[in-house]
Image: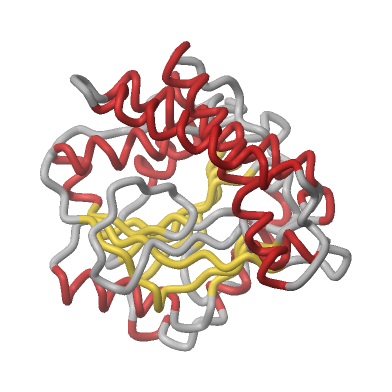
Amino acid sequence: MQISICICTYRRSSILDTIKSILAQPNLDTIQAEIVVCDDDPARSAQAAVEAIAARSPIPICYLSSGASNVAAARNACLAGARGKFIAFIDDDETSEPDWLLQLLLTQAKYDAHVVKGFVRGVYPPETPAWIRAGDPFTRDCGPTGTPVVTIGTGNVLFSREFAMKHKIGFDLDHGPAGIEDIDFFWRMGALGANMVACREAVVNEIVPLNRVTPEYIRQRSYHFGRVHGSTTRKMLHGAKPLRDGIIAAASVLSLWPLTFIGLEQGSPFWERLYCRCFTKFWYSMGMLEGIAHGRSSEIHK
């Protein structure tokens, strides 16, 4: 098996769209691939739908259940059940572009990479406020293909199963509730010398629901991600790095608060984009200060 495409799911019907987008890839006949789905819902709510689509799939689809309501446990179940030389993770609210797998594999071969991080494009509902659409906070771009990457999540990533197994790297259950199990996993891979690069051509689309395009959700999301970053920095790094990151975060808070609160969410696209980026950076920095100061990351904001 060349590649195992792993999807962790928790009570999202969009998992079917994710699987269908993978099965629609035109190069599947030249890639030895399988799909591994792990249901983190104790009620196994995805089982019937996944097994139905598996019955007519041209490639193997394996349904697993962690039943733990802990995404780290679901990811570890995927690692244990996968047979591929490479493992690719995609989220259950994402759909892949037609050449997604091929681009990940081509980039891995070109750069002899242990980890390849793809491009995530936010797809917004029509009712999205203009300033959120302009700022595009759900799109994640790690740079041109080949750019070294340090901080990586599991939404659209490929990595060497052999490297992870050789170094006995798994997803930490203690980090699952806070949603930092993936950051911790890839930081440990990087610390052990993994070559980790970006691939801008490997694109997945994150379908953003309406309840996520509100100021309150963007604020909480940014604050949470900052708190996760700060907490992880405090726990995993030593010396002057946490202090330096804290100083940078404090400077961001002081410099951005005027732009964040003077109401530039309506205006030209330039000002709307600026407002969104200031707004998200301000709350990210506020969360980072708390994470560095107290070392808490709390549960992920769904």
The reply, left or right, for residue 11 in relation to residue 73 is right
Q: Residue most toward the bottom?
A: 26
Scheme by which the image is coloured = secondary structure
Q: Residue at x 56, y 44 (%)?
A: 281
Percent x, y of residue 301? 67, 33
* Location of residue 253 (image quadrant): top right
Q: Residue most toward the right?
A: 127
Q: Residue at x 30, y 28 (%)?
A: 244
The reply, left or right, for residue 242 in relation to residue 176 is left
Position above or below: 7 against 188: below
* Location of residue 115 (image quadrant): bottom left
Q: Which residue is drawn at 16% across and 70% down?
A: 111
Of the pair 186 and 101, the residue shown nearer to us? 186
Q: Residue most toward the top?
A: 294
Position above or below: 126 against 88: below
Percent x, y of residue 43? 73, 32
The reply, left or right, for residue 177 in relation to residue 180 is right
Position above or below: 299 against 284: above
Of the pair 129 and 69, the residue shown nearer to us? 129
The reply, left or right, for residue 210 in relation to residue 238 is right
Q: Give the mark count.
A: 0
Q: Residue at x 52, y 19 (%)?
A: 290
Of the pair 257 and 224, the residue shown nearer to us? 257
